[in-house]
Amino acid sequence: MQRQRFPSRLSALAGVGWGSFMLVGWMAVAAPLRGQSVSPPVAEYQQKARSSFQLHNGSLFPLTVVLEVRGFRVTEAGEVVDTPLDTSRVHVKLSAMSFRIAPRGSYRVFYEATGDTLPAWFNILSAMSGARTDNGLNVRLLLPHVVYLNQKQPLKKAEVAIRAFQLDATAKKARIHLENLGPRLGRVLQVNVSDGHTTSEPAGGLPLFPKSRRWIEVPWQGEKVPTRLTIRFARFTLDTALTATLAPLASDTAAGTRRP
């Protein structure tokens, strides 16, 4: 019997090196068995890429690997959804499309990528077959290498808006709804909330895509409602006095700290 792990909706790597799509940030599609891994899971480049990533087979079985370049989009809640690559504007060349990796072995894939318009992003998906579980089931694994091609000009402070700041007292989480008003890709490096006495543990490490919105969750252990919000980007920081409102009981704005 063969078990295939190939969901149409990818989860993002949190830290997202898009760890857990990734997306965690970045993007893990299926949990590795016995040490199958991709390194690095997420990579960012200025305008174009000429780079590589390495696949490792930590099992006792040889693996057959087939590569596919895919696009993706990220919902407001942080779910990463698989889409076809827009080959009319994103161009990717790989050094190989299929190969085998010996037991306990590794293989390095080289690639070049350009975009007719920037920013651009895509996922090089490695489908690995030949691994087996402890009870003998054959498993097909999917490991992503997520690539961002950043535009020359960075995201600007004036292009980011805070649309909501909520407190879910039951779940002990603060929720922030951000919007990127501009055409540039940016990355939230860290988010903290505070009530003047207690400061949350930092959250963040996620991309903020052009012309899009994103919910971020921050664990909150304070006894009072947070009254300050700090969001750090690479080139600027949003630090504002803002009192969180109580989140609706039946909220559809649940978000995770997933990172593509």
Image (spheres, grey):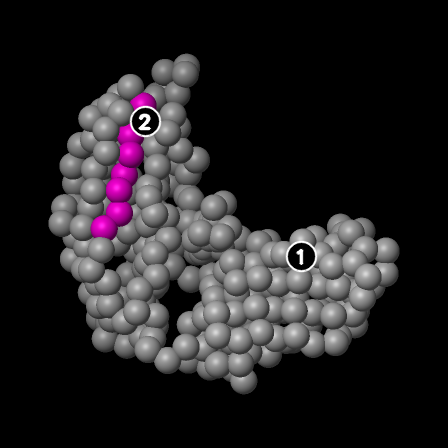
Tag 2 secondary structure: loop
- Secondary structure character of the magenta stretch overall: strand
Which residue is outermost to the left?
95
Cα separation, mark 2 vs mark 1, equals 35 Å
Return the x and y of residue 33 as percentages of the image width and height.
39, 28
Residue nearest the viewer, comparing 8 with 109: 109
Disc 2: which residue? 58
Relative to 56, 250 lies left or right: right
Disc 1: which residue? 218
Residue nearest the viewer, comparing 103 with 228: 228
Relative to 235, 92 lies left or right: left
Return the x and y of residue 132 as percentages of the image width and height.
34, 21
* Residue 71 seen in this snapshot: no
Return the x and y of residue 36 as percentages of the image width and height.
34, 32
Image vertical order of residue 79 relative to residue 89, above or below:
above
* Image quarter of residue 130: top left
User: Split into 4 quadrants, where in the image is the N terminus?
Assistant: top left
Residue nearest the viewer, comparing 238 with 125: 238
Residue type highlighted by circle 1: Val
User: Which of marks 1 and 2 precedes in the sequence?
Assistant: 2
Please give the name of the residue rendered at 41% of the width and 15% of the height, measured from the top-left corner: 135
Tag 1 secondary structure: strand
Relative to 234, 226 lies left or right: right
Please give the name of the residue rendered at 21% of the width and 37% of the height, measured from the top-left corner: 107
